[in-house]
Image: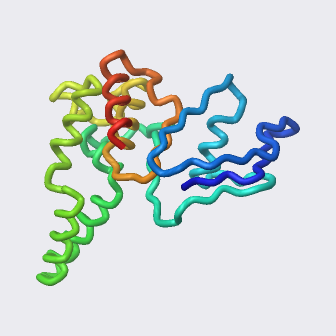
Amino acid sequence: MIVFSSLQIRRGVRVLLDNASATINPGQKIGLVGKNGCGKTTLLSLLKGDLQAEAGNVTFPSTWSMAWVNQETPALDVPAIDYVIDGDREYRELERRLQQANDNNDGHAIALIHGQLDAINAWTIQSRAATLLNGLGFSQQQLTEPVKSFSGGWRMRLNLAQALICRSDLLLLDEPTNHLDLDAGNLARKMAKKL
């Protein structure tokens, strides 16, 4: 459960929220609607921990994992599919630990990590990433092209795929369908409904 209690948020002299309270229960899907500058992105930044409220607080379980769509994408030499998979931080950490266990010839650690990889369905991550990217309009050839070769709109699609591939308790989507055509927008909605 997410609880906003007596929040006050200002941007300069402008008050965005004043003594605002709300509760969001697990499983609820919430949309924030309002004109530009009213504080929608600010509220998401508060949830991510990127800023603090002037008064009040936000609480949610510390064990929750959170995913969000980054608004910026660096011009990387990384292939598109690897960039998307990088969004699954737990998978990448287990992959790193497995390599270290292999380097150390630690059979016990290798077996333990394989069990953890099984638990997160890691063996299908390449196909899941490819399916997401194909659904967002990327061709098979584009999956191996570097992130830096894509325009801003296509990079936003990469960021969306990166957020959707994560297992998360809380998924924050700030204008997620910007730069998406109808089919890609429908896929994004379908994926969000599964969460």
The image shows residue 127 at horizontal and vertical percentages of: 15, 42
The image shows residue 108 at horizontal and vertical percentages of: 15, 84
Q: Is 9 on the left-hand or right-hand side of 35?
A: right
Tell me: residue 163, above or below residue 143. Answer: below
Closer to the camera, 171 or 129? 171
The scheme the figure's colours follow is rainbow
The image shows residue 47 at horizontal and vertical percentages of: 60, 50
Q: Is 35 on the left-hand or right-hand side of 15?
A: left
Q: Does any portion of residue 70 appear in the rendered image?
A: no
Give the quadrant of residue 13: top right
The image shows residue 32 at horizontal and vertical percentages of: 60, 32
Position of the N terminus, as image quadrant, is bottom right
Q: Is 106 on the left-hand or right-hand side of 136?
A: left
Q: What count of labels does the image hold?
A: 0
Tell me: residue 135, above or below residue 163. Answer: above
Position of the C terminus, as image quadrant, is top left
Query: Residue visible at 76% across and 49% down?
Result: 7
Query: Residue visible at 16% across and 28% down?
Result: 141
Q: Which residue lies furthest to the top in this view?
A: 182
Tell me: residue 133, above or below residue 43. Answer: above
Give the quadrant of residue 153: top left
Query: Residue visible at 66% across and 41% down?
Result: 42
Q: Which residue lies furthest to the right in this view?
A: 13
Q: Is 99 on the left-hand or right-hand side of 69?
A: left
Query: Residue visible at 15% across and 76% down?
Result: 110
Q: Does any portion of residue 112 appear in the rendered image?
A: yes
